[in-house]
Image: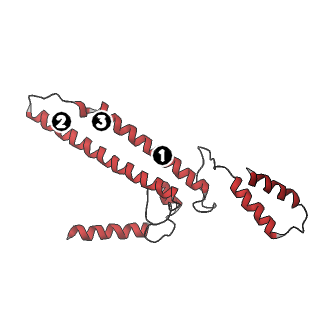
Amino acid sequence: MPKITKVKKKVKKIKSKAASKSKIKVFNKAKAVIKGPVKISKSYEPKDTEKYMCEKHRVFFRMRLQEWKKELVRANNEALYNGSMDDNSISADIVDQASSYTDKNVEMKAINRQIKLISEIDKALLRIKDDTYGYCLDTAEPIGLKRLMARPIAKYTIAAQEKHEKDEKVHADD
């Protein structure tokens, strides 16, 4: 708190046009320190006219990723606790048993995919915290708002993603 009072005193002194630039810089630095967290409305959409990955963009994507994660966790819990996974009844018919086994297998694969997606969302949230979100992990170029809106967990630009997919295909063929 003492720094804020000193800044207020300096601001009062800087009323004339002949004030030095260094005092104005001190004022601007103090102003940046005083700022609180950025709040955005639920209807906010990032725009290309704004500075790329400004604080508003980061808040927007953080909220979007957290909401997506909550939905996935809720869906997984419902599938595990309320779904057909609890069906322990053994049918006398072998075809029914096979069908039940297949259904459970498909459901478990879907849950596993969602768990991996939750992990990717957590990694994206960490990148937001580290200020690396929105930039390609390979090239450090901006990924782009359109791509992030379509796939908020994107780690690469489209060109870098295509390269990774091509490399995966080459290695899978070996």
Residue bearing the label numbered 3: 80
Q: Nearer the viewer, residue 131 or 142?
A: 131
Q: What residue do we see at 71% from left, 53% from top?
A: 34
Q: Quadrant of the C terminus?
A: bottom left
Q: Is residue 21 visible?
A: yes
Cα–Cα gap, marks 3 and 1: 21 Å
Asked which secondary structure carries label 3, the reply is: helix
- Is the C-beta separation of discs 2 and 3 under 8 Å? no
Q: What residue do we see at 50% from left, 61% from top?
A: 134
Q: Left or right of 81: which side holds 50?
A: right
Residue bearing the label numbered 1: 66
Q: Residue furthest front?
A: 2
In the rendered structure, which amino acid carries the disc numbered 2? Ser
**Badge 1: how crowded within 10 Å, few (<14), some, or many (20+)?**
some
Cα–Cα gap, marks 2 and 3: 15 Å
Residue 26, given in percent of the width and then of the height, sits at 76, 63
Q: Is residue 150 visible?
A: no
Residue 160, given in percent of the width and then of the height, sits at 41, 69
Cα–Cα gap, marks 1 and 2: 34 Å
Closer to the chain start, of discs 2 and 3, is: 3
Asked which secondary structure carries label 2, the reply is: helix
Instruction: Find residue 119 and name its label.
Output: none
Asked which secondary structure carries label 1, the reply is: helix
Q: Quadrant of residue 20?
A: bottom right
- Is the C-beta separation of discs 3 and 1 under 8 Å? no
In the rendered structure, which amino acid carries the disc numbered 3? Leu
Instruction: Find residue 100 and name its label.
Output: 2
In the rendered structure, which amino acid carries the disc numbered 1? Gln
